[in-house]
Image (cartoon, rainbow, N blue to C red):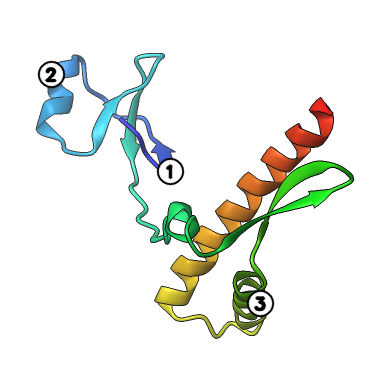
Amino acid sequence: MQTLGKVKCRIHASTPSAVNRHPGIGYDQNETLFRTAMVTELMVQPSSWVETGIAVETVRGLKLFKFTKELQDRFEELIELYKQEQLTDEQQAELKGLTELDRIFTLLNARTIADS
């Protein structure tokens, strides 16, 4: 079971079968009952920008991933809207996807530099 958040609470139940009567309640590794709080967050999949938003640039002989100029400009625009608390739900999902892609690029580029 994958959850985005977990709220632990003590529930008095003597057997695991008692859990089956209560949706959202299950056992963790220590056989302690917990209730899962599912949080739904929308995110544009980072892979959606593979064809149009990714560039590979050679820096000091190393090929590093980066956003295209257009995608970098969009990322910065969304960051400004976030700072002003003016993001729509769609823009927030887009910003989360771009933030994740930026994090992936940072990790890949760091590994490339470390391995050189």
Mark 1 and mark 2 residues within 8 Å of each other at the beta carbon: no
For image coordinates 74% across by 32% down, the residue present is 111
Element type at mark 1: loop
Q: Which residue is mark 3?
A: 73
The answer for how far apart the CA atoms under marks 3 and 1 are is 32 Å
Image quadrant of residue 12? top left
Q: Which sits earlier in the primary sequence, circle 3 or circle 1?
A: 1
Element type at mark 3: helix
- Quadrant including the C terminus: top right
| Coordinates of residue 66 in the picture (x, y in percent) | 68, 56
| Mark 3: few/some/many CA within 10 Å (<14, 14-19, 20+) | few
Q: Is 83 on the left-hand or right-hand side of 97?
A: right
| Mark 1: few/some/many CA within 10 Å (<14, 14-19, 20+) | few
Q: Which mark is residue 17?
A: 2
| Coordinates of residue 90 in the picture (x, y in percent) | 41, 75
Residue 105 vertical position relative to residue 78 in the rendered view, above or below: above
Disc number lying in front (3 or 2) = 3
Q: Which sits earlier in the primary sequence, circle 1 or circle 2?
A: 1
| Coordinates of residue 37 in the picture (x, y in percent) | 34, 46
The answer for how far apart the CA atoms under marks 1 and 2 are is 23 Å
| Coordinates of residue 33 in the picture (x, y in percent) | 32, 25
Q: Which residue is mark 1?
A: 5
Residue 39 vertical position relative to residue 30 in the rendered view, above or below: below
Residue 87 vertical position relative to residue 1 in the rendered view, above or below: below
| Mark 2: few/some/many CA within 10 Å (<14, 14-19, 20+) | few
